[in-house]
Image (cartoon, rainbow, N blue to C red):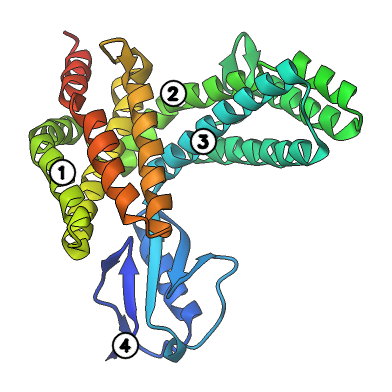
Amino acid sequence: MKRCDVQVMINDFPVDFELQNDKKVSDIIQSISEWTRERDLVFYEMYIDDGRYSLDMVPDISLSDVKTINCIVQSRADVVFSSVDEAARYCDRVSAFIKHVVETGECNRNDIEDLLTGISWLLEVLTKVCTFLGLNHDGLKYKDHELSHHISAFETFRDSLNAVMDTAHVLTVLQDNRGIFLDVKYIFRMLLLSEEMRSLIVQSIDSPDVLISSLRQTKDELPDQLAGIRAAAIAYQTGKDAEGSERLKSFIDFIYRYTRTCYQAVPMFRVDLAEIDVDGVSLELKNRELRNLLHEVTVIMENNDIISLSDVLEYEIRPNLENLGAYIDVLLDKISGK
């Protein structure tokens, strides 16, 4: 057995990986796939040097042509959480789009083609989430109808959009179905609160006591993280990019741990983040605003706009997080039944 000269990572963390007769990237994929199956994890994509690949699109190339392989894996519960979160955000965007179209009459065929693609994607996500949870379409009800009824209505809406071409008919179809994406969003939320989701969490991720401990740890670490955000902004402003980058990485790791714990608490303790309120703003909305700010940071970093990066850190993200501890207190009280 010989050591692998390629740097193999799992979720950005280097692992000590050894090879026998492995010579190609496909050999690494097979080994990591076996490792994840043994642990009931989901191996769904990988980065080869600077390229991102799904498992069915990975180039079968020699390891001698590769420097790093970063394998991205998640627990089944994390896959459900991330998929449902993205689907819910898409439903919000489409609802806003339909409202704009109905009010202004502004719409073109490209918009409709994009919407049709999005609907097909939502149906795929819904099917896969139900599969992960072990639910069939007739085993869940929403608004006195089984899930299969809502899926059929969604498919009918998609087919109606696909069948019409003129703007007047498109506007009629959108007007008649303007609430359908809100229904889909609440179906996803209901899935997160289901007993099947709770069981999946118990099987695959942190126990209730660990989640509570993680929330308390988040609150305890918050002052240092707020100071770290300010220090990162100052570092970027004074040309100390390496220091700023290190502090930013620490903050992103902190936010990832908090977000993961926060969303795991939803089905584990049967709480609704929309009902966790501080000064009239829900934790669900606060998390969404934070997620949008982090996305903005990603875009800014891709554009290498250091000035904007420091401004967003100090004047937007830091103020957004200053009262996070109060939300955690309310959430912990909710969990304990106070």
**Badge nearest the viewer, 1 or 3:** 1
**Badge nearest the viewer, 4 or 2:** 4
| Left/right of residue 318 with respect to residue 145 in the rendered view | left
Name the residue carrying label 4.
5
Indicate the amino acid at tag 3. Gly
Secondary structure beneath label 1: helix
| Left/right of residue 44 with respect to residue 96 in the rendered view | left
The answer to whether any part of residue 21 appears in the image is yes
Mark 3 → mark 2, Cα distance in angstroms: 11 Å
**Badge nearest the viewer, 1 or 2:** 1
Secondary structure beneath label 3: loop
Indicate the amino acid at tag 4. Asp
Q: Sequence order check: which comes first, mark 3 or mark 4? A: 4
Q: Badge 1: how crowded within 10 Å, few (<14), some, or many (20+)?
A: many
Name the residue carrying label 2.
194
Mark 4 → mark 2, Cα distance in angstroms: 46 Å
Name the residue carrying label 3.
134
Mark 1 → mark 3, Cα distance in angstroms: 45 Å
Secondary structure beneath label 4: loop
Q: Residue 82 location in percent, x, y?
A: 44, 41
Which of 240/55 is in front? 240
Residue 51, above or below 3: above
